[in-house]
Image (cartoon, rainbow, N blue to C red):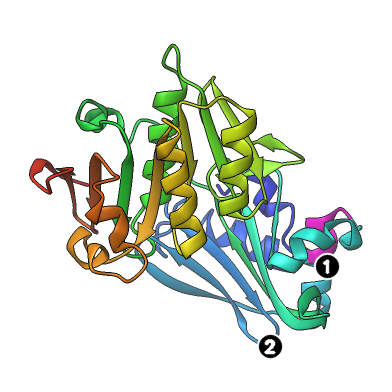
Amino acid sequence: MIDRQVLSVLPLKVREVVERELGSTAKENNLSAEIVEEIRLRAGRQVLLVTGKGEIYLHVTVDEMMIREALEYISGYSLYAYEEQLREGFITIRGGHRVGIAGKVVMEQGRVKTIKNISSVNIRISHQIIGCSDKIMEYLKGNILIVSPPRMGKTTLLRDILRNLGNMENQNIAIADERSEIAACYNGIPQNDIGERCDVLDCCPKDIGMMILLRTMSPTYIAVDELVTAQDVDSVLKIVGAGTFVAATIHGESVGEVRERKGICELFERKIFDTYIELSKTSISIFNSNMEKIYEGIV
């Protein structure tokens, strides 16, 4: 069965259908708690379950009242208290599950003030895989970059690498968790197991967060999800220049494709990363700083 925290934020009518479909008819619909990744509620559309094996529509149509009911449960009947997170388009709930929202954006002085008239809710179910990095830890040296297309598990792998590092002596791991995807903080407390020696700066822009952590937490590693901007790259260069290691992820089809990308190529030219991890649906490959493959395995 799906985590009770997830069920508790679903509209009652939807909750009944989901519980039924994941209960008595789970085998018939090829569903299990382990493979349900998202529950999507769209006004005027049927509930959609996204699983590791495909998409399944449930026979219940979402209306505006159901969306409003879900938002009340998600926010504890105080949506205004989540104004800062709403500006980013998501709310993290207990258990580390992230709820994405879409609706009408209200702008003020060129910035997003809030989102109202919410018509879509996407509940992304947190599935931490403890131990998924255990067999590759011996191949990881110094600065680490994980490369993969979306939804291939790079954040899951990064999280577990940090858990392993954070349980080692003489390590201080600091996470600049811009969108609460690594530690999944709820009221400031990580909901995921990220190790004993780990500090999290939640909901802070990556480039700013990395610099704050460098100055204040004496980290041996600073971790960040999804390098994108020139500011991100500049922060990585400053961190490495200060003698601190970096563990990061980036969207890309392969390490070779990423190394040719404008704005990112400098990291490769200067051989900033000591270890590259390339993920696909079926395999994992690890390369050293000279792009020599040192490990290949099946996911």
> Are circles 2 and 1 on residues that touch, CB within 8 Å?
no
Structural crowding at the residue carrying mark 2, measured as other residues with C-alpha within 10 Å and reported as few (<14), some (14–19) or many (≥20): few
Is residue 74 left or right of 292 when viewed as pictured? right
Structural crowding at the residue carrying mark 1, measured as other residues with C-alpha within 10 Å and reported as few (<14), some (14–19) or many (≥20): some
Relative to 74, residue 5 above or below? above
Q: Is residue 129 visible?
A: no
Disc 2 residue type (three-letter): Gly
Relative to 17, residue 144 above or below? above
The answer to which of 293 and 279 lies nearer the viewer is: 293
Relative to 187, residue 56 above or below? below
Relative to 39, residue 174 above or below? above
Disc 1 residue type (three-letter): Glu
Q: What residue is shown with label 2?
A: 44
- Of the numbered discs 2 and 1, the one sitting upstream in the chain is 2
Is residue 220 left or right of 268 when viewed as pictured? right
Q: Is residue 286 visible?
A: yes
- The magenta-colored residue range is 71-76
x and y, in percent, of residue 290 in the image: 12, 45
Q: Magenta segment, principal secondary structure?
A: helix
Q: What residue is shown with label 1?
A: 69
The answer to which of 251 and 60 lies nearer the viewer is: 251
Residue 161 placement: quadrant: top left
Report helix, strand or loop for mark 2. Answer: loop
x and y, in percent, of residue 9 in the image: 74, 57
Is residue 286 left or right of 166 when viewed as pictured? left
Q: Residue at x 80, y 81 (%)?
A: 107
